Image (cartoon, rainbow, N blue to C red):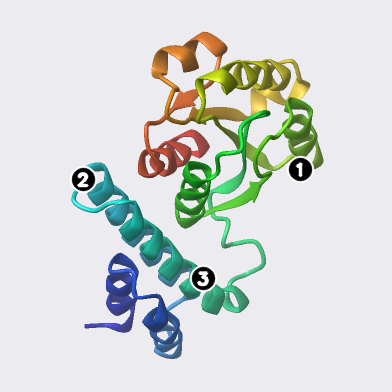
Amino acid sequence: MSKLAEVVDLVERGKSKLVGAAVQGALDEGTPATEILNGMIDAMAVVGERFKNNEIFVPEMLVAARAMKKGVEVLKPHLASGSTATNGKVIIGTVAGDLHDIGKNLVSMMIESAGFEVTDLGVDVAPEKFVEAVKADPEVKIVCLSALLTTTMPAMKTTVEALSAQDFRGSIKIMVGGAPITQAFADEIGADAYTADAASAAQKAKELAA
């Protein structure tokens, strides 16, 4: 097995203690850093598919994402600055009044694993804060909003309205998700995309950024 194939295999299996050495080994063999990064991104796509098909569950997905993170740490110095964000920049946060972050964190990790640079604004994020974050970085392509409570769905609507009122609306895509959110609700509030789980969110982000 080549060192690159070993890296891909270790990420898929979530072996974070072994990934760093394998990445270094692949670099020592002369494999380009971007090729290794793409290999790990592909591995996470496989993990995401397995998750969607209920072959694995959240813990296994988290373990694989952590393994990828370890690999990226070793790669970073070898990548041209900023090229770990091959697909662009994403802002994510849980909307005002909602303190849930497990789903958001999982989506954040999966989107990062898909080759995006992610800025996580945390939980209970006011609409203005999302607006300011996009204004502060014109390179942002996607804004992801999460809500876990039916009572905070109106806050998601308000946030989409606040973002839609800005001049930059044409250059960003708004993705929404969370337990009570549906495609119908996403359409109603004017979001660009809705996904039911973290693996689908990563896939959708790639499509939107393409």
**Residue 129 placement: quadrant:** top right
Residue tagged 2 = 54
Q: Along the polypeptide, which appears first: circle 2 or circle 1?
A: 2
Residue nearest the viewer, comparing 19 with 210: 19
Mark 2–mark 1 Cα distance, whole angstroms, equals 37 Å
Q: CA distance from mark 2 to mark 3?
A: 27 Å
Residue name at image x 40 percent, y 31 percent: 195
Residue 184 horizontal side relative to residue 173, left or right? left
Q: Are marks 1 and 3 in contact (CB under 8 Å)?
A: no
Residue at 48%, 68% in the rendered image: 34
Q: Which residue is mark 3?
A: 72
Instruction: Kindly identify the amino acid type of the residue bearing the numbered disc 1.
Output: Asp
Task: Look at the picture and state if 89 lies above or below 130.
Answer: below
Q: Earlier in the sequence, mark 2 or mark 3?
A: 2
Dot 1: element:
loop
Residue at 45% x, 82% y is 20
**Which residue occupies 66% across, 28% down?**
97
Q: Secondary structure at mark 2?
A: loop
What is the crowding at mark 3: few (fewer than 14 residues within 10 Å), some, or many (at least 20)? many
Marker disc for residue 137: 1
Vertical relation: 198 (above or below) 193: below
